[in-house]
Structure formats: structure tokens, C-alpha cells
């Protein structure tokens, strides 16, 4: 403390859990600035998870299915997670087995691009399935 006062600087405790605690003589405001700067850099490097959605109907036509599958391949190859779901309108809920078959077919055809994170699950009027991209 005497040395810090003599130099007109602050005694900053760097790691209080160490035995003995590590301290450094420096300007406290400069220390805070550098700490915020470090945290900002770490936050920028953290990857953000992007979730793309693809919606099907229980009786989606083959051409529409292929078109949406092509988009799904593009999303997975870009590194985004994919949420594929079948939306049941009105009384079409009676075709939930067709919806499940459709999602499982999609999962099987996208096997080389991504892996199934969550199998098809019915939630209300939606049957959802999550796929995550395979690491390169």
C-alpha cells in the first residue's frame, strides 16, 4: 500500500482466491477498461446458434418436399440448426402418422448433412423435429 501511495497509483487485487492473493500496482480505471475489452472480445468470439425453420403439411407433395429438402441441406451446410415441423390444420390431425413418416423420411435423407437432435414429437397441432449440423 505504501509503494502504491508513493507512486500515486492503486493497489489492484488481481486474483483474490490465490494463496497469497495476487496484487498489482496500476491505475484501477485502466484495469477496468482492459477487463471490459477482454470480455467484449470473448463475447464476439462466442458462436451464435441460428435456428432455421421448415414447415410442412401432412400431405406435402413430392415436388414441394424436394424443394424444402434442398433448403434444409443449404441451412445445415451453412452451420445452422434446423427445426422441421408439420403443422396440422383443423381436422388434419388425424394424419399425424403421415406427418411423422414425412419427418423421419427427411431425417433419413439429411443423415449425411446433420444428425437428429430430437425425434419427431407432437406438441399441440405441431409435430416438430430438430436437426443439428455435422461438424466439418
Image (cartoon, rainbow, N blue to C red):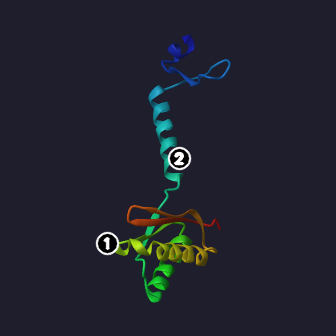
The picture places residue 36, in percent across and down from the top left corner, at 47, 38
Q: Nearer the viewer, mark 2 or mark 1?
A: 1
Q: Position of residue 121 (x, y in %)?
A: 49, 63
Q: Position of residue 104 (x, y in %)?
A: 56, 73
Secondary structure of the residue carrying numbered label 2:
helix
Which quarter of the figure is the N terminus placed in? top right
Dot 2 or dot 1: first in sequence order is 2
Where residue 65 appears, as percent x and y from the top left, is 47, 83
Q: Nearer the viewer, residue 75 or 68?
A: 68
Asked if the residue under mark 1 is in contact with the one under mark 2, i.e. CB atoms within 8 Å, the reply is no
Q: Residues within 10 Å of mark 1 (few under 14, many from 20)?
A: few
**Residue at image x 38%, y 65%?**
125
User: Residue at coordinates 46% horizontally, 84% vertically from top-left?
Assistant: 67
55 lies above or below 118 = below
Q: Residue at x 48, y 26 (%)?
A: 27
State the residue at coordinates (31%, 72%). Answer: 90
Q: In the rendered image, which residue does mark 1 sit on?
A: 90
Q: Mark 2 to mark 1: distance in Å?
A: 48 Å
Give the quadrant of residue 55: bottom left
Q: Which residue is mark 2?
A: 42
Circle count: 2
Of 97 and 4, which appears nearest the observer?
A: 97
Crowd around label 2: few <14 · some 14–19 · many ≥20 (10 Å): few
Amino acid at each position: 500500500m505504501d509503494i502504491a501511495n508513493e507512486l500515486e497509483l492503486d493497489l489492484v487485487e488481481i486474483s483474490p482466491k490465490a494463496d497469497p492473493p495476487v496484487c498489482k500496482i496500476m491505475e484501477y480505471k485502466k484495469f477496468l477498461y482492459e477487463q471490459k475489452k477482454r470480455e467484449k472480445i470473448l463475447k464476439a468470439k462466442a458462436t451464435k446458434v441460428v435456428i432455421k425453420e421448415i414447415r410442412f403439411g401432412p400431405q406435402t407433395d413430392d415436388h414441394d418436399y424436394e424443394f424444402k429438402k434442398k433448403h434444409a441441406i443449404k441451412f445445415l451446410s451453412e452451420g445452422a440448426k434446423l427445426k422441421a415441423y408439420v403443422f396440422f390444420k383443423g381436422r388434419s390431425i388425424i394424419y399425424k402418422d403421415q406427418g411423422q413418416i414425412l419427418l423421419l423420411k427427411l431425417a433419413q435423407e439429411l443423415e449425411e448433412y446433420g444428425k437428429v437432435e430430437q425425434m419427431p414429437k407432437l406438441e399441440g397441432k405441431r409435430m416438430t423435429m430438430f436437426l443439428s449440423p455435422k461438424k466439418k
